[in-house]
Image: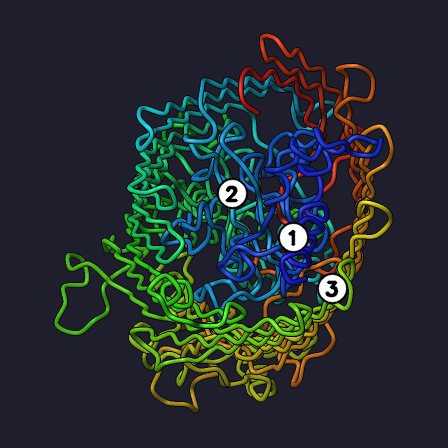
Amino acid sequence: MKKSWKKTALLLGAVAAGPSVLAQQPARRPTLADTTRQKVALTEVVVAASKVEESFLQSPVTVEKLNARALRLTPAPSFFDAIEHLKGVQVITPSLSFKVINARGFTNTTNVRFAQLVDGIDNQAPHIGGPIGNVLGPSDLDINTVEIVPGTAAALYGLNAINGLANFSTKNPFQSEGLSVLQKTGLNHVNDPTSSAKLFSETSVRYAKVLTPKLAFKVNGTYLRGYDWIANDQTELNPNGNATTNLFGPDNPARDPVNSYGNESSNRSSLTLGGKSYSVARTGYNESDVVDYRLQTIKYDAALHYKPSASTELAYTYRGTMLDNVYQRSNRFRLEDYHLQQHALQLTGPVVQARIYLTTENTGKSYNLRSMAENLDRSFKPDAVWNQEYTRAWNAATAARQPVAQAHATARTAADAGRLQPGTPEFKQRLTELAEINNWDQGAALRVKADLVHAEGQVNVAEALRRGGSRLPTNLDLLVGADHRTYIIQPDGNYFINPEKNKDPLNDNLTYSKTGGFAQAGVRLLDERIRLTATLRADKNDYFSTRFNPRLTAVYSPTRQHNFRVSYQSGYRFPSLFEGFSNVNSGQVKRIGGLRVMSDGVFENSYLRSSIDAFNTAVTAAINANTSSANAAEKRRVAIEQNQGLLVKTPYTYLKPEYIKSLEFGYKAALLPEGRLLLDVDFYYNSYRDFIAQVEAYVPKTNNPDSAAIYLSNRTTQNRYRLWTNAQSQVYNYGGTLGLRYELPAGYLAGASVTYARLDRTESGDGLEDGFNTPRWAYNLSLGNEKAYKNFGFGVNYRWQARYYSQTFLVIGNVPAYYTLDAQLSYSVPAPNLRFKLGASNVLNKYYVSYLGGPSVGGLYYLAVTYGLY
């Protein structure tokens, strides 16, 4: 009975796993020959959920999967783009070649809360703390399966997996041998008002060879070229900057459009003109003025696999990439000549799995777009000189009886005389010069060299004991593992320094390490109808005491078709390198890490920027409302005294680890004859504490607290900081997903899913926590068939998401609802093993933004020709 139950459960798990299994199941009743052909399909499993192979149907937590058939049917341009079609997954697009995966809320453009692995190996850029899309990942030719675990996986994976993880499994050269070539040629920016249509091209090659029964290798190469999506949002971020003088819209001299840089708050001055106080910004430049939107990615990898025994494999893998594209965190960047490399050695077997890898990062000739625009203006004319000329011209214009708004326009034209103009040789030369200056108060260069060293291992203790002759019951499982990670940064004097005492801040490398381990025990009861698992993880960071993460899961299968699951787990996230150690001079605001070693003394002596802004707005309003005969200095003194009570000392303090507790329920079933209908439902409730976020806080340049208000009323008499700290709010969110996948007659595969995510409440509501940045509702509909008519196939996917409120340091507001329709037609030629795929993402070319401040995304139309394995 037990063997029959286990075999049937595995079969159902394989069917429920979906596309690659169902692809081999004809509409008629299977014959013995069909069953034979399905032997490989019967082994369909998932690994990411529990770090051991298990039936997809009986996974103890939610797992989404893309396998071979799903990847062939997808109309998305790549397997990475296809991830957006999975339920419970949110993808945002900072760049055509840089997309960010997230699940269950609190999305941002780097998303250090979501881990991304390739064959179990983290492919993050070390100093960023997250991956740059798929630039260090596999090509479409080498991808085997994709597993997504929405929700915290920190108990098993630690580090930054508190919102979930993705694991990309590549093709093994022992099992996928031969030459494969893929050529994609496409077009984007069709009917784009900001650009003419542009060509897109991606060429990939894969070659694998089995040299002996024990030795095999593979090599991959991809070359991608194109023109990036353009960010040109001109929405006004400072519409009320001069409300007290009734200057709005284009008349507002402190205008700050979203994708215009150099006119942010740190680039504004308070000028007293005609007895009134005006906020006046430098002119700034549009993003398209200071960035090259041409993108290029060259990535390559090679692997040597050795089998010392039939069930054990040792593999060395080298990956490398060079890229030029646009990247975004708090600011947007041009990544140019950016290099990532990775060396990995891993051992996989039934008892022991181990891996060690080194990732190196060099940002090359990259630069910050905001700092570039700021310093293009300041290198042409310093703020003080520009303000003097602006004041002189304004006075002259009003003396000539020009209206106030016109006088401001006249003053700007006069102060901007001789300003560098985009596209001119002088402008290009200055841009090149500033891109080499590694100080954002004077230039824009991003110059970081960083390494990540990681080692981990796990032992299947139960399997080892049984192989050693123990009579350990077969229904018991025991797994233990440990890992260590060290980040190594070469200080550049601007982005990072070494803050440790007795260390040279510019020559001694900065190191940041973490060590952890876990133990997992499981038992299968009542003829494997009940599966219980308990996991405990411990992690120790250089700057924090040991933290413990438990996970408890249960799966109940009353029948072979129905599986109920429940899990509880917690997770800690230690601050990333950038959050802990950044040391950036950025437009007269210094961004520093929140660890005490970096920001000692700042929190205790600073005032919230939000309160300083409110204070200065009130001071300006009081000055402009004062009709007395007093001089300007006296009016300002009185206004400061009247409003200094608005100033608020910073209540935040030094960084602590972020913490989440999560409860999840789920139900998965393979219904109808042969399990043709897969139903998957889940619901979760999360509680977050000590959210890691940023706060702007300024320190007056005085030791006398009675004088603080005077110093905080003048930009030049305060030190400005942007600090990483923890929100004081307790944050709760909940949501769920429902997915259906139905295998129709004649090989048609239909799918539908809906995702719901909601921020429940925050206790104390300090507003500091990262924005939820997640649509409340999203749904996907899909239909496809590889053999709709002879060798012709098709795939379509429709995705819609609701409007949502976005809160970032770049911009705050509502992201409009949008939908996309992706479609593809394919034709296969069995000999010589060719496949043609004509497709488009956003085929209707309805331009949308996936987050505020990001680019406008239109249709990408492509023809893909594949030869060989796919």
Q: Residues within 10 Å of mark 1 (few under 14, many from 20)?
A: some
Q: Are discs 3 and 2 less than 8 Å apart at CB?
A: no
Q: Residues within 10 Å of mark 3 (few under 14, many from 20)?
A: many
Q: Quadrant of the N terminus?
A: bottom right
Task: Using the rendered view, name the quadrant where residue 273 is placed.
Answer: bottom right
Residue that badge 3 annotates: 563
> Distance from label 2 to label 1 (Cα)?
38 Å
Residue that badge 2 annotates: 133
Residue 139 at x, y percent in the picture: 50, 31
Residue that badge 1 annotates: 7
Q: Is residue 562 visible?
A: yes
Tell me which label, 3 or 2, sits earlier in the chain.
2
Q: Secondary structure at mark 2?
A: loop
- Taking the spot 78% from the left edge, 36% from the top edge, the residue there is 797
Where 709 sits versus 88, above or below?
Answer: below
Task: Using the rendered view, name the quadrant where residue 624 is placed.
Answer: bottom right
Q: Secondary structure at mark 3?
A: strand
- Taking the spot 34% from the left edge, 37% from the top edge, the residue there is 339
Residue 530 at x, y percent in the picture: 66, 72
Residue 561 at x, y percent in the picture: 78, 58
